[in-house]
Structure formats: C-alpha cells, structure tokens
Image: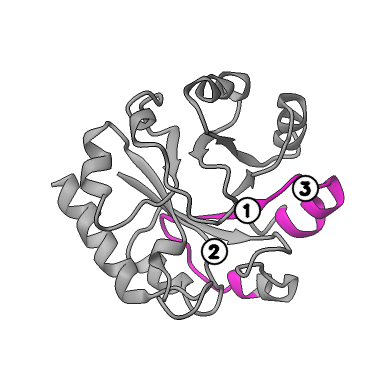
Amino acid sequence: MKVKICGLNPARDVQLCIDLNVNYLGFVFYKKSPRNLNFSEIEKLKSYNKKNSSFVAVTVDPDNEFIKRVVLGNFDYIQLHGSESKYRVKEIKSMGLKIIKVIKIEKESDIDIYKEYEHADIILFDTPGMEKSIEFPKDLISKLPKGDKYALAGSVTYNNIENIAKFGVSFCDLSSSLELDTQIGYKDHQKIKKFIEKVNELKN
C-alpha cells in the first residue's frame, strides 16, 4: 500500500513523514485552503534528505509562471486538481514534471475520464469536495482500475483502510483525517504514526 499525505507543513511534519517512509508528501497551493502554503516556506523543504519520499505540489489550474517559479526544482510531482485538459497535462509534463491528475468522481460514468489522462504518472480518484472530506462512494471503489498508478482519496481513515484494501486499492491519499480534532490544517503526529503502523500491518 502506497501512501500520500497531503496538506503538510514544511517545518512541523516533513521529517516525521520521511522517517515513516511515507511515499508522497503533499503541499497545498490553493488560496482558499486552510492548508495553503506560503511561498517563503518552500525554502525549508530544501534542507531535508527525502530518502524514499517524493514531494508533491498540489495545485488548481496552475499557470506556467507559477510552475516555473514555484514547482520546478522544488517538487518531484505536480498534482493537478482543476479542470486541466489532456493537452494541458501533456504541456505541463513536457516542462519536466511528473504528473498526478485528479479525477473527481460522483457517479460510475465519471471513472472512465481517467482514460483521457493515461499519460499522467498517477491518477488520483477523489470526491468533488475540494478538501471538504466527502466520503468516496463505497459502491464505486471496486470499479476503479487497479495498480500502483491509481490512488484513492476521500475520507480514507485508520478505521476503514483495511476494508478499502479489500477492494483492491493499493494507493491511498489522506489529509483531514490525520489532523488534530481541534485545529484544521494541523497534522496530528500520533494519528500519522498510527495510520502508517496499520498500513505496514496490512503489507505483512
């Protein structure tokens, strides 16, 4: 089971996630989000030895200037959470970045949209909630394509990850379920440790 944790803070959370071998560390660039990162914080990321982890810039319809100024040289992947066309995704990939393309799922017919973006490195199936923790429809999880290229987001938690894995999901993305109960945008390190322990148990 590969894991991506999103909405991380460069100073507080990164070393813990690296030490726990979290595969993908996501940093949000979306002004409406309580997890939005200030550009000044990006410099802190350069001080880490990433080991086996990859850094991901989570964006919504980014323009080329933003990609060149913020993403290139600082992040391994760019996550595209907006209405980017398959042509725009190819254009961004040609700039030298690995791509995570988000496909927002409300009904079964939405799943097939991913086929337009097969040139993306990772496809992330999510709900249309934009960080509102909408639960992914259980009846659709088993219909998603299988494999390490395909990730699931949408109310993945410590309590349901075992059941989700039974549907054949081998890559999950979490954010709000790993936060402090009292403060949005602040990760609870005990919750992160507990979740990764659970994932490691499932691997064995």
95 and 11: which one is in front? 11
Please name the amino acid that badge 2 sits on: Gly
The residue under the point 31% across, 70% down is 191
**Above or below 151: residue 144:** above
Gap in angstroms between the C-alphas marked 2 and 1: 9 Å
Residue at x 25%, y 67% (from the top left corner): 194
Which label is found at residue 7? 2
Q: Amino acid at mark 3?
A: Pro
The one nearer the camera, 127 or 9, is 127
For the magenta stretch, what is the residue range?
A: 44-71
Total labels: the figure holds: 3
Residue 198 appears at what percent x and percent y?
21, 57
Q: Position of residue 186 (x, y in %)?
A: 49, 76
- Image point 72% across, 36% down: which residue? 83
Other-residue count near label 1 (Cα within 10 Å), few / some / many at <14 / 14–19 / ≥20: many
Q: CA distance from mark 2 to mark 3?
A: 17 Å
CB atoms at circles 2 and 1 under 8 Å apart?
yes
Q: Position of residue 143 (x, y in %)?
A: 37, 23
Q: Does dot 1 land on a helix, a strand or a loop?
A: strand
> Please, what is the three-letter code of the amino acid marked with disc 1?
Val
Question: Mark 1 to mark 3: distance in Å?
Answer: 10 Å
Query: Which residue: 81% across, 58% down?
Result: 69
- The question of residue 187 being in magenta is answered with no
Q: Dot 1 corresponds to which residue?
A: 58
Q: Is residue 12 above or below residue 56?
A: below
Looking at the image, tell me whether mark 2 or mark 3 is earlier in sequence order. 2
Please tell me which of labels 2 and 1 falls first in the chain.
2
Residue topped by disc 3: 62
| Image quarter (top left, top right, bottom left or bottom right) of the N terminus | top left
Q: Residue 50: x and y, percent?
A: 47, 62
Is label 2 in a helix, a strand or a loop? loop
The reply to whether the C-beta atoms of the residues labelled 1 and 3 are less than 8 Å apart is: no
